[in-house]
Image (cartoon, rainbow, N blue to C red):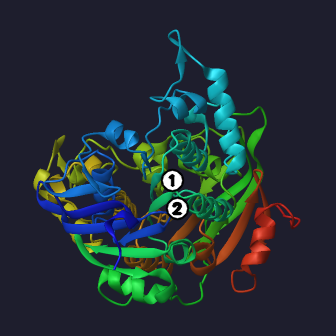
Amino acid sequence: MEKTQDYVIEMLHITKEFPGIKANDDITLQLRRGEIHALLGENGAGKSTLMSVLFGLYQPDQGVIKKDGKEVRINDPNDATALHIGMVHQHFKLIDVFTVLDNIILGAEDTKMGFVQRRDARKKVQKLSEQYGLKVDLDAKVEDITVGMQQRVEILKMLYRDNEVLIFDEPTAVLTPQEITELMAIMKGLAREGKSILFISHKLNEIMEVSDRVSVLRKGRYIGTVNTAETNPVELSRMMVGHDVQLVVDKDPANPGKVVLDVKDLHVPSKMYKHDAIKGVSFQARAGEITCIAGIDGNGQTELVYALSGLEKCSGGTISLNGQDITHAPIAKRSIAGVSHIPEDRHKHGLVLDYTLEQNMVLQSFEEPRFQSMGFIKFGEVRKYAERLIEQYDVRSGQGPVTIARSMSGGNQQKAIVAREIDRDLPLIIAVQPTRGLDVGAIEYIHKQLVKQRDAGKAVLLVSLELDEVMNLSDRILVMYEGEIVGELDPKQTTVEELGLYMAGAKRQKMGVSA
């Protein structure tokens, strides 16, 4: 039998309620010293809430927390930091207009006579970034760096504070396969140094690879803890969702039809650098086909999607939708013309966080006759529509359609966006990281919906960093490297290794005008 002192953290009988929902219902979680302990559960199962209680963002309604066997009260994140508990949040807590360095040291500044010792701080951060392979531009503003780079800043923030209990809330959701491999190595290295890690993830292969033990939550309740070496992905997914889950996409061969999206010689300037982020890209997306843009994060995928959706102006080339030139059309016109967009950043471009769920569901369609008459919104119709999507896509929230979007879990926010965009029934769906932060059950459902849209004659342009998703879901893969398309691959005829060579720029094809 293990002694209490074997545990660095004990969360005993934790209960936390919000209006309309019991997020944590009598949960006990014990973290051993020097272990990587995974926390697994569906979207809205209560994982992030439980970790927010440990980090002092929420106060438990019942239960106690012990650190090194002694009961502690964590009133706020400052208390957590004093106890050497750090957290990398799923949605980053960064200040966009500050530099990377300022974000890392904010709240933990070393001062002398009232002046921040920036030189010493820079040296410490540079040493940490080299030690853990987390290279970042310390002088770049956070608003100008990629989501993957922002993730690195969050990890460096935690390491800078010398924390010994490290909470990672979905840390790989925005990372490339290469960055994930690096992070796994970093986490193992931290555990070897005696750090204790709590690791929230939906990705069963990552949990199998990196964790020592796994605790499973379902709908706010504790299901059980298993040793990773004694379990498998099928058993874990069954514990998580309560039934067997299909882990491979089941789809018939594609029947590509007419060209829906035609991109010719597209150039998009880079915000950060003088050169173009997109350099003469040409490709087509056809009806009845899932065309995937694959690549390591930061190789122009974001700028390409921004240009296609109208968020960014292009400096050359043309974009046509069903033969109509939309190169310089504003976002609203593209939307009406038939572009559906599941964005990369759900907070910045997907939702109005302080609106209700039902208001978010009709953001692009509230002017349609079914939702308004003579300038007045038909609130009853909006409610009915939102309720249908919530049920169909299993969007879980405390107060249903009137839930404020900000209060929902990240995965359920994502499901709401996917529901809205797919249900708009438009000829082109641009899906950027559509399953980011979703559990296996939700991923299975979203993949089926995208295949269903393909089979209904829609053109699906998938942009994904997940190699499994790229290989499983796409009918045709276009690989981007340094702002160019360097290869067109058939997922049935290629391997993950070959795909990786194209993504790394080690291999390339001669591309014609139309890929």
Residue that label 2 marks: 433
192 lies above or below 256: above
Q: Assess whether mark 1 and mark 2 are in contact (beta carbons under 8 angstroms).
A: yes
459 lies above or below 80: below
Q: Which is more toward the observer, 55 or 284? A: 55
Q: Residues within 10 Å of mark 2 (few under 14, many from 20)?
A: many
- Residue at image coords 15%, 52%: 402
Q: Could you tell me the amino acid type at mark 1?
A: Glu
Q: Relative to residue 299, is residue 252 drawn left or right?
A: left
Q: Is residue 443 visible?
A: yes
Report the quarter where the N terminus lies: bottom left
The answer to which quarter of the image holds residue 25 is bottom left
The disc, 2 or 1, on the residue closer to the chain's N-terminal end is 1
Checking the image for residue 344, the label placed there is: 1
Q: Relative to residue 199, is residue 353 drawn left or right?
A: left
SS type, badge 2: loop
- Residue at image coords 27%, 61%: 11
